[in-house]
Amino acid sequence: MKIAFTTDGDGLEAALDSRFGRAPKFLVYDLEKEKFEVIDNKQNLNAAQGAGVQSAAAISQSGVQALVTGHCGPKAFQVLKTAGVKVYNTDAPTVAEALKRYREGTLTEASSSDVESHWV
């Protein structure tokens, strides 16, 4: 199973970015292989609109089954839900801590978005 984390770094000790659509990068962690890859999201950092939807499409196409982030808006949430990607919101300071919380089962799956559109 693959999980995506929003971040601005290139490793597990990097900070977890609280934004989904405008996160600089996504760290995609493969739980079975215990390896990760980083997907660049620079094209959406300054997008006038559609950053969340475009980011959700990129995440869906990467084969992830779950996303761990700080916040996720309604349009992105709908795209992820339609693609079968579960969303988990957390205030974890790092990707490593968010991964630990996911493994421990202490994260709760989101049932809806937790911010309005165009949240920065």
Image (cartoon, rainbow, N blue to C red):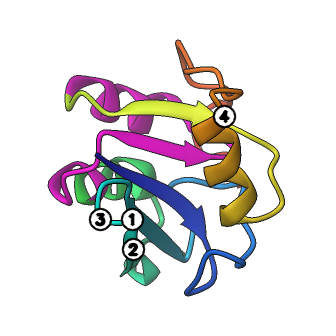
Considering the numbered disc 4 on the image, is that residue within a helix, a strand or a loop?
helix
The residue tagged with tag 2: helix, strand or loop? strand
> Is 117 located above or below residue 120 in the figure?
above
Give the Cα separation between the discs numbered 2 and 4. Answer: 19 Å
Q: Where is mark 4, residue-wise?
A: 104
Q: Residue at x 62, y 84 (%)?
A: 9
- The span shown in magenta is 59-82
Residue 107 is tagged as none
Question: Which numbered mark, 2 or 4, is in the foreground of this view?
Answer: 4
Of discs 2 and 3, which sits in the foreground? 3
**Residue at the spot x=82%, y=45% of the render?**
91
Q: In the visual, does 15 lie left or right of 38?
A: right
CB of mark 2 within 8 Å of CB of mark 4? no
Question: Residue 104's spot in the image, x, y percent?
Answer: 66, 34
The CA span between labels 2 and 3 is 8 Å
Give above or below for 104 relative to 1.
above
Residue receiving disc 2:
36
Q: Which residue is mark 1?
A: 28
Q: Quadrant of the C terminus?
A: bottom right
Q: Is residue 74 magenta?
A: yes
Kindly check if marks 3 and 4 are in contact, taking CB atoms under 8 A apart as contact.
Answer: no
In the image, residue 33 above or below residue 79: below
Cα–Cα span, label 3 and label 4 = 18 Å
